[in-house]
Amino acid sequence: MQKREFERGVVYLGDCMEVMEYLGRNAAEVCVTSPPYNLHTKYHKSQTQTSAKFQEKLDRWYDDDMPEWEYQGWQQSIVHQLTKVCTSSVFYNHKIRYAWHSRNTYKNENRIYHPMHWLNKFPIWCEIIWDRCGIGNPTSRYHNQTEKIFQIGKPRKWNNTEGLTNIWRFPPSRNDGHVCTFPEKLVENCILPTTDEGDTILDPFLGSGTTAIVAIKHNRRFIGIEANEEYFNLACKNIAEAEKEFNLNSTTTSRRTA
Protein backbone atom coordinates (compact mmCIF):
# COMPACT_ATOMS: atom_id res chain seq x y z
CA MET A 1 0.00 0.00 0.00
CA GLN A 2 1.10 3.56 -0.64
CA LYS A 3 0.64 6.42 1.78
CA ARG A 4 1.20 10.13 1.95
CA GLU A 5 1.83 11.79 5.28
CA PHE A 6 0.72 15.30 6.18
CA GLU A 7 1.26 17.52 9.18
CA ARG A 8 -2.07 16.46 10.70
CA GLY A 9 -2.65 13.02 9.27
CA VAL A 10 -2.06 10.40 6.63
CA VAL A 11 -3.81 9.15 3.48
CA TYR A 12 -3.45 5.55 2.27
CA LEU A 13 -3.90 4.32 -1.28
CA GLY A 14 -5.27 0.81 -1.04
CA ASP A 15 -8.08 -1.51 -0.03
CA CYS A 16 -9.77 -0.19 3.10
CA MET A 17 -10.05 -3.61 4.76
CA GLU A 18 -6.34 -4.27 4.34
CA VAL A 19 -5.40 -0.81 5.60
CA MET A 20 -7.70 -1.07 8.62
CA GLU A 21 -6.15 -4.43 9.52
CA TYR A 22 -2.80 -2.66 9.41
CA LEU A 23 -4.03 0.23 11.57
CA GLY A 24 -5.28 -2.06 14.33
CA ARG A 25 -7.59 -1.28 17.22
CA ASN A 26 -8.41 2.22 18.46
CA ALA A 27 -6.47 4.04 15.75
CA ALA A 28 -9.15 6.75 15.56
CA GLU A 29 -11.77 8.32 17.81
CA VAL A 30 -14.63 8.34 15.28
CA CYS A 31 -15.28 7.52 11.65
CA VAL A 32 -17.26 9.61 9.16
CA THR A 33 -17.78 7.95 5.81
CA SER A 34 -20.06 7.36 2.85
CA PRO A 35 -19.34 4.19 0.87
CA PRO A 36 -20.21 3.51 -2.78
CA TYR A 37 -23.96 2.86 -2.98
CA ASN A 38 -23.82 0.02 -5.54
CA LEU A 39 -25.99 1.94 -7.99
CA HIS A 40 -25.28 -0.31 -11.00
CA THR A 41 -24.22 2.52 -13.28
CA LYS A 42 -23.55 0.07 -16.13
CA TYR A 43 -27.31 -0.03 -16.57
CA HIS A 44 -27.67 3.76 -16.53
CA LYS A 45 -24.84 4.20 -19.04
CA SER A 46 -26.72 2.06 -21.54
CA GLN A 47 -29.83 4.24 -21.49
CA THR A 48 -30.16 6.60 -24.44
CA GLN A 49 -32.66 8.88 -22.68
CA THR A 50 -30.15 10.22 -20.14
CA SER A 51 -29.14 13.84 -20.58
CA ALA A 52 -25.69 14.71 -21.88
CA LYS A 53 -24.77 16.27 -18.52
CA PHE A 54 -25.86 13.21 -16.56
CA GLN A 55 -24.14 10.89 -19.04
CA GLU A 56 -20.90 12.82 -18.56
CA LYS A 57 -21.22 12.30 -14.81
CA LEU A 58 -21.80 8.56 -15.29
CA ASP A 59 -18.75 8.29 -17.52
CA ARG A 60 -16.63 9.57 -14.61
CA TRP A 61 -18.28 7.30 -12.04
CA TYR A 62 -16.31 4.89 -9.86
CA ASP A 63 -16.74 1.11 -9.99
CA ASP A 64 -20.15 0.56 -8.39
CA ASP A 65 -21.60 -2.63 -9.85
CA MET A 66 -21.25 -5.50 -7.39
CA PRO A 67 -23.82 -8.31 -7.00
CA GLU A 68 -26.06 -7.03 -4.22
CA TRP A 69 -25.55 -10.00 -1.88
CA GLU A 70 -21.79 -9.53 -2.21
CA TYR A 71 -22.08 -5.77 -1.67
CA GLN A 72 -24.09 -6.15 1.52
CA GLY A 73 -21.64 -8.70 2.93
CA TRP A 74 -18.74 -6.40 2.03
CA GLN A 75 -20.37 -3.45 3.79
CA GLN A 76 -21.10 -5.52 6.88
CA SER A 77 -17.44 -6.59 7.06
CA ILE A 78 -16.27 -3.00 6.70
CA VAL A 79 -18.56 -1.70 9.45
CA HIS A 80 -17.45 -4.53 11.73
CA GLN A 81 -13.82 -3.56 11.16
CA LEU A 82 -14.61 0.13 11.71
CA THR A 83 -16.06 -0.63 15.14
CA LYS A 84 -12.69 -2.12 16.08
CA VAL A 85 -10.52 0.62 14.58
CA CYS A 86 -12.60 3.41 16.15
CA THR A 87 -12.72 4.00 19.89
CA SER A 88 -16.10 5.75 19.68
CA SER A 89 -18.88 6.18 17.09
CA VAL A 90 -18.97 5.29 13.40
CA PHE A 91 -21.03 7.73 11.29
CA TYR A 92 -22.17 5.82 8.21
CA ASN A 93 -23.97 7.71 5.41
CA HIS A 94 -26.15 5.64 3.06
CA LYS A 95 -29.62 5.61 1.52
CA ILE A 96 -32.56 3.36 0.70
CA ARG A 97 -32.44 1.94 -2.84
CA TYR A 98 -35.41 0.40 -4.63
CA ALA A 99 -35.11 -3.02 -6.28
CA TRP A 100 -37.97 -3.32 -8.76
CA HIS A 101 -36.00 -3.33 -12.02
CA SER A 102 -34.93 -6.47 -13.89
CA ARG A 103 -31.29 -5.51 -13.25
CA ASN A 104 -31.94 -6.17 -9.55
CA THR A 105 -31.48 -9.94 -9.72
CA TYR A 106 -31.39 -10.17 -5.93
CA LYS A 107 -34.69 -8.96 -4.46
CA ASN A 108 -36.12 -8.80 -0.98
CA GLU A 109 -39.83 -9.34 -0.43
CA ASN A 110 -40.37 -5.60 0.02
CA ARG A 111 -38.31 -4.69 -3.09
CA ILE A 112 -35.89 -2.37 -1.32
CA TYR A 113 -32.27 -2.48 -0.31
CA HIS A 114 -32.24 -0.84 3.10
CA PRO A 115 -28.97 -0.16 5.00
CA MET A 116 -30.50 -1.87 8.02
CA HIS A 117 -30.36 -5.14 6.08
CA TRP A 118 -26.62 -5.21 6.83
CA LEU A 119 -26.51 -2.93 9.88
CA ASN A 120 -29.10 -4.72 12.01
CA LYS A 121 -26.46 -6.58 14.04
CA PHE A 122 -24.67 -3.40 15.09
CA PRO A 123 -25.53 -1.09 18.04
CA ILE A 124 -27.27 1.90 16.43
CA TRP A 125 -27.02 4.86 18.79
CA CYS A 126 -28.85 7.33 16.54
CA GLU A 127 -30.46 7.40 13.10
CA ILE A 128 -30.07 10.80 11.45
CA ILE A 129 -32.11 12.00 8.47
CA TRP A 130 -30.26 14.16 5.96
CA ASP A 131 -32.72 16.39 4.11
CA ARG A 132 -30.93 17.28 0.85
CA CYS A 133 -33.14 20.35 0.31
CA GLY A 134 -34.76 19.34 -2.96
CA ILE A 135 -31.59 18.25 -4.78
CA GLY A 136 -31.99 14.97 -6.65
CA ASN A 137 -32.77 13.23 -9.91
CA PRO A 138 -36.42 12.97 -11.03
CA THR A 139 -37.94 9.48 -11.20
CA SER A 140 -41.41 7.98 -11.56
CA ARG A 141 -41.69 8.00 -7.75
CA TYR A 142 -42.05 10.92 -5.39
CA HIS A 143 -38.60 12.45 -5.41
CA ASN A 144 -36.50 10.85 -2.69
CA GLN A 145 -34.72 13.79 -1.05
CA THR A 146 -33.34 12.13 2.08
CA GLU A 147 -30.42 9.95 3.03
CA LYS A 148 -29.57 8.36 6.37
CA ILE A 149 -26.58 8.76 8.63
CA PHE A 150 -26.37 5.91 11.12
CA GLN A 151 -24.37 6.61 14.27
CA ILE A 152 -23.10 3.19 15.27
CA GLY A 153 -21.88 2.92 18.84
CA LYS A 154 -22.33 5.24 21.81
CA PRO A 155 -19.98 8.25 21.68
CA ARG A 156 -17.40 8.56 24.42
CA LYS A 157 -17.64 12.36 24.26
CA TRP A 158 -20.70 14.55 23.82
CA ASN A 159 -20.87 18.34 23.55
CA ASN A 160 -23.84 19.34 21.38
CA THR A 161 -23.47 23.11 21.74
CA GLU A 162 -25.51 23.77 18.57
CA GLY A 163 -28.47 21.80 19.86
CA LEU A 164 -28.54 19.58 16.78
CA THR A 165 -31.52 17.29 16.27
CA ASN A 166 -31.53 14.09 14.21
CA ILE A 167 -32.80 15.97 11.13
CA TRP A 168 -30.10 17.84 9.22
CA ARG A 169 -31.04 20.21 6.37
CA PHE A 170 -28.42 21.30 3.84
CA PRO A 171 -27.84 20.61 0.14
CA PRO A 172 -25.20 18.21 -1.19
CA SER A 173 -21.84 19.65 -2.19
CA ARG A 174 -20.39 20.16 -5.65
CA ASN A 175 -16.85 19.12 -6.54
CA ASP A 176 -15.36 19.33 -10.02
CA GLY A 177 -12.95 16.46 -9.39
CA HIS A 178 -15.30 13.87 -7.83
CA VAL A 179 -18.70 12.60 -8.94
CA CYS A 180 -20.34 12.58 -5.51
CA THR A 181 -19.08 14.29 -2.37
CA PHE A 182 -20.81 15.03 0.89
CA PRO A 183 -20.83 18.59 2.30
CA GLU A 184 -18.46 19.81 4.98
CA LYS A 185 -21.42 20.59 7.24
CA LEU A 186 -22.24 16.88 7.42
CA VAL A 187 -18.76 16.09 8.72
CA GLU A 188 -18.85 19.02 11.17
CA ASN A 189 -22.16 17.83 12.64
CA CYS A 190 -20.60 14.42 13.23
CA ILE A 191 -17.24 15.37 14.72
CA LEU A 192 -17.76 18.60 16.67
CA PRO A 193 -20.10 17.11 19.33
CA THR A 194 -18.17 13.81 19.62
CA THR A 195 -14.46 14.71 19.47
CA ASP A 196 -11.97 17.12 20.98
CA GLU A 197 -9.18 19.01 19.27
CA GLY A 198 -6.32 16.64 18.54
CA ASP A 199 -8.57 13.58 18.14
CA THR A 200 -8.24 11.47 14.99
CA ILE A 201 -11.05 11.12 12.43
CA LEU A 202 -11.11 8.17 10.02
CA ASP A 203 -12.67 7.93 6.56
CA PRO A 204 -12.13 4.62 4.69
CA PHE A 205 -13.76 6.00 1.51
CA LEU A 206 -11.99 9.36 1.43
CA GLY A 207 -12.95 10.46 -2.10
CA SER A 208 -11.93 14.08 -2.63
CA GLY A 209 -10.80 14.45 1.00
CA THR A 210 -13.72 16.26 2.64
CA THR A 211 -13.48 14.46 5.99
CA ALA A 212 -9.76 15.20 6.27
CA ILE A 213 -10.23 18.84 5.26
CA VAL A 214 -12.90 19.40 7.92
CA ALA A 215 -10.69 17.69 10.49
CA ILE A 216 -7.87 20.13 9.64
CA LYS A 217 -10.16 23.17 9.87
CA HIS A 218 -11.22 22.14 13.36
CA ASN A 219 -7.76 21.18 14.59
CA ARG A 220 -8.34 17.43 14.50
CA ARG A 221 -6.11 14.75 13.00
CA PHE A 222 -7.20 12.40 10.22
CA ILE A 223 -6.66 9.02 8.59
CA GLY A 224 -7.97 8.65 5.04
CA ILE A 225 -8.14 5.57 2.83
CA GLU A 226 -8.90 5.66 -0.91
CA ALA A 227 -8.74 2.76 -3.37
CA ASN A 228 -8.95 4.86 -6.54
CA GLU A 229 -5.59 6.39 -7.48
CA GLU A 230 -7.18 9.36 -9.25
CA TYR A 231 -9.21 10.27 -6.18
CA PHE A 232 -6.22 9.56 -3.90
CA ASN A 233 -4.21 12.17 -5.80
CA LEU A 234 -7.15 14.59 -5.75
CA ALA A 235 -7.60 14.17 -2.00
CA CYS A 236 -3.89 14.70 -1.35
CA LYS A 237 -3.96 17.89 -3.41
CA ASN A 238 -7.02 19.23 -1.58
CA ILE A 239 -5.60 18.31 1.83
CA ALA A 240 -2.27 20.01 1.09
CA GLU A 241 -4.13 23.19 0.15
CA ALA A 242 -6.30 22.97 3.28
CA GLU A 243 -3.25 22.59 5.53
CA LYS A 244 -1.54 25.53 3.85
CA GLU A 245 -4.62 27.70 4.39
CA PHE A 246 -5.03 26.53 7.99
CA ASN A 247 -1.40 27.32 8.80
CA LEU A 248 -1.68 30.72 7.13
CA ASN A 249 -4.82 31.59 9.09
CA SER A 250 -3.22 30.38 12.33
CA THR A 251 -0.15 32.55 11.73
CA THR A 252 -2.31 35.59 10.98
CA THR A 253 -4.38 35.05 14.13
CA SER A 254 -1.24 34.68 16.27
CA ARG A 255 0.15 37.95 14.96
CA ARG A 256 -3.08 39.77 15.72
CA THR A 257 -3.19 38.52 19.31
CA ALA A 258 0.51 39.11 19.98
Image (cartoon, rainbow, N blue to C red):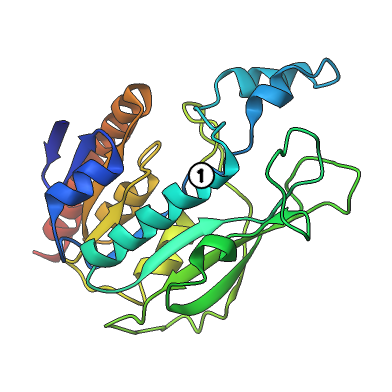
Residue projecting furthest to the left: 258
Residue 32 pos. (x, y %):
38, 58
Q: Are there few (<14), some (14-19), or many (20+) residues within 10 Å of tag 1?
A: some
Left or right? Give the position of 113 relative to 180: right
Residue at 34 percent across and 72 percent down: it is 89
The amino acid at mark 1 is Tyr
From this view, report whether residue 149 is shown above or below residue 195: above
Left or right? Give the position of 95 relative to 214: right
Residue at 75 percent across and 47 percent down: it is 99
Displayed quadrant of residue 167? bottom right
The reply to whether residue 189 is in sight is yes
Residue holding disc 1 = 71
Tally of marks: 1
- Pick the front one: 64 or 100: 100
Left or right? Give the position of 19 relative to 57: left
Residue 187 pos. (x, y %):
42, 59
- Pick the front one: 190 or 83: 83
Residue at 57 percent across and 66 percent down: it is 116
Residue 162 pos. (x, y %):
47, 80
